[in-house]
Image: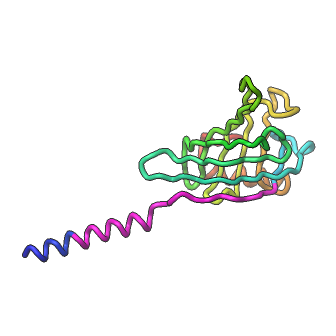
Amino acid sequence: MRIKSTIALSLVFLLCIGLFLYFYDFPKQINVDRAAVIFTKDNPSPSINTKVMIKGTLYRPIFHQEKFVGKVIVDSYPFTKVDSSVEIYVTQKTHGIRMGNLFYQQTTPNFLGTEQALIWFDNEFENINIWPTTPWGDTKRDENVFIVTKSNYEQAINMQKMMREKFGINFVPK
């Protein structure tokens, strides 16, 4: 009788370990270069083609907040190329779309300036939507600028619609 209970307990333990290994997403190395478009909301005419390069690790622990640690470089913005890494803490995840805060700290001795944005991305960093919440570069404070990983404005708008449908009400643009 003792042997049967030991065998049953061992099988349950192995089943739990097997399920854990099957479903747990271990840290994922990311190294992608994506074509992107920079545009202001509802205005395709001044769209700019650029590239977004992402290299780092996406940490997906079971009982803690997900985060990405690495580099997010937008080719058109020199401050993103500074030799420092960013940490994006995933504040919300819905249907495979993650949202987080993207901060770039100035490396001058006083460290006063920052550039900030909200970023949405999928599991493979194929679809990325960046919304600068502070003016980046030559943009004006009241302009809603977006950096979206697609080849042209029409594809970018369609990708934003798809992400909005998956993510829901907290996706920008509305």
Residue 63 is left or right of residue 41, and the answer is: left
> Of 86 and 99, which appears nearest the observer?
86
Q: Identify the residue at the far right of this view.
A: 45
- Residue at image position (60%, 48%) is 68
Spot occupied by residue 1 in the image (x, y as percentages of width and height) = 7, 76
- The span picked out in magenta is 10-35
Q: Compared to 15, does 147 lie above or below?
A: above
> Of 27 and 140, which appears nearest the observer?
27
> Of 161 and 143, which appears nearest the observer?
143
* Residue 102 located within the stretch drawn in magenta: no
Residue 1 is left or right of residue 155, and the answer is: left
> Of 34 and 39, which appears nearest the observer?
34
Residue 156 is left or right of residue 161, and the answer is: right
Spot occupied by residue 114 in the image (x, y as percentages of width and height) = 72, 29
Q: Compared to 157, does 79 lie above or below?
A: above
| The quadrant where residue 40 appears | top right
- Residue at image position (66%, 48%) is 70
Q: Compared to 98, does 22 lie above or below?
A: below
Spot occupied by residue 141 in the image (x, y as percentages of width and height) = 80, 26
In the picture, the quarter occupied by the C terminus is top right
- Residue at image position (63%, 51%) is 165
Spot occupied by residue 152 in the image (x, y as percentages of width and height) = 85, 54
* Residue 32 located within the stretch drawn in magenta: yes
